[in-house]
Image: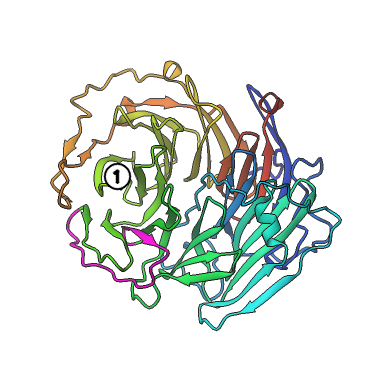
Amino acid sequence: MSSVLCAHFDTPEGRWTLVSEFTTEDAANQFVPHIGQRLGGDDLSVGASVEPRPPTPPSSVSAKFNASSTLMVSGGLMFGDSAPVASGVKAHGLANRPTHVMMFQAEPESQSEPEPLAKSKPHGKGLVTKSTSSFVARIITNENLARWIVDSRTTYILFNAPKCFNVVGMQPDNRGETLARLDMSLASPTCYDVNSGARLDVVMGFVRGNIVWYEPVSGKYARLNKNSGYVPSVMCVRWLPNSSTLFMVGMADGAVMVMDRTKDEFVVPPMPHSPVFACAETRPKTNPVSYWRVSNKPITSIEFSPDARHVAVTSEDGSLRIIDYMEESLCDVYQSYFGGLTCCAWSKDQKYVVTGGKDDLITVWSYYDKTVVARGQGHKSWVRNVAFDSMHCGATYRFFSVGDDARLLMWDLSLSALHRPRVHTSRVAASPTNTGTHSRVPGQSREPTVHARMPKGSVAVLQPLVAEAIHDAPLCSLSLSQDLLVTACRKGVIKVWKRPTPYLS
């Protein structure tokens, strides 16, 4: 790979420009760092007050934005045979995988104009609370955290370092402060999600199966499955839409659970192992609220549909499953070309689901037509993350992808411009079939549809519009807003890119 990395890339609409770059270790190794140039600045330099430090173990970092261009970046350690891990943490044979990206919007608690946090103002002091827990060592909270939270200009950056979880705030006129940090005694978080709302409710999963709820403003936390004996690694976690208490967890044993952060007791219900999809009977006063056997391989991603009724689940078994989570009903099962699927994303209008996987391909599925629309060829290694661009949703859909080849690819999907295969596959050849391997709960009336794998020559081929090497390490995350794009690599380097001027005007 070339040592020269681009500081911009061109698209038909104009030039995307790198406006900020910093590393996660800057904030992880000290409590109140200057973590980088303010967003929108002309320089790319990291704050001068940060001294060079030895590299930290690789992290996967994901970025989130709200509608007003507030972004949040979060990351999780990547465990696997080829990735070094933190001291005291075993890989357990998990393959390298990304932490996925989703939208986030903080709701201000007050309509009054907050006091500006001037760039020249001294950083807030860290209030340290030591914990008597064997799992959490200490909780550190910035004395100015409440003012940062209610300020709509705040950019949140969440990430992990070995044995700690960090919340950093940035504003256009402020270089940045560490707002909160949760130090663990032994474990390191592998995945997490933040609930959109007035509070910063964080749920974290760990390699040994621990699930932790953490609220940085109050400094409170809770282990939701303490001493349960259920130890499969937590692979992914997502808050349920429009809920302040419920979230969904994907596990390394192929189970998917719905958890309630307000319930302390955790009891794993008995589950038959033969069906591909089965729903267990759960206790009303304990976690999990729902418990499904989805696959015999690790769950790799969970993404909720725009209608807040369905959830797309990908797995190492190479399947994309569409589940009606309100009815606890498996609707459709799609197969990758080969190998496991690693990530997925919904289009804004819910017409398409895009997946990436270990076949180095991007696959576009039609949710309503229930078929493969196209396969994108362009990555030279496993695809780690995909995200739709909400600014392009109509005649042309645009989405981005990143992967282990350290490249960012931009795709335009237009049905009229697709390269059609020479031989058209009839509906009979790709006809779906019903399966009897779905154990239904009472009240369900349909069997899931398992769609046949489409041969390579019968699917339209999609080529990337842009392919750029933008990092010097495997990329694992990206996210988009109306004016920004954020990318991150396994080294913990985060880059912020500004959209072309026509979008901003």
Q: Over which residues does the magenta segment extend? A: 253-275
Residue underneath mark 1:
323
Q: Secondary structure at mark 1?
A: strand
Q: Position of residue 219 (x, y in %)?
A: 59, 69
Q: For residue 231, what is the image quadrant?
A: bottom left
Q: Residue furthest top?
A: 416
Q: For residue 18, what is the image quadrant?
A: top right
Q: Residue at x 65, y 55 (%)?
A: 149
Q: Residue furthest left?
A: 436
Q: Tell me the kind of residue under disc 1.
A: Ile
Q: Is residue 482 magenta?
A: no
Task: Name the one closer to the observer, 214 or 426.
Answer: 214
Q: Is residue 42 left or right of residue 334?
A: right
Q: For residue 227, what is the image quadrant?
A: bottom left
Q: Position of residue 250 (x, y in %)?
A: 37, 57
Q: Residue at x 57, y 53 (%)?
A: 198
Task: Name the one closer to the observer, 326 or 375.
Answer: 326
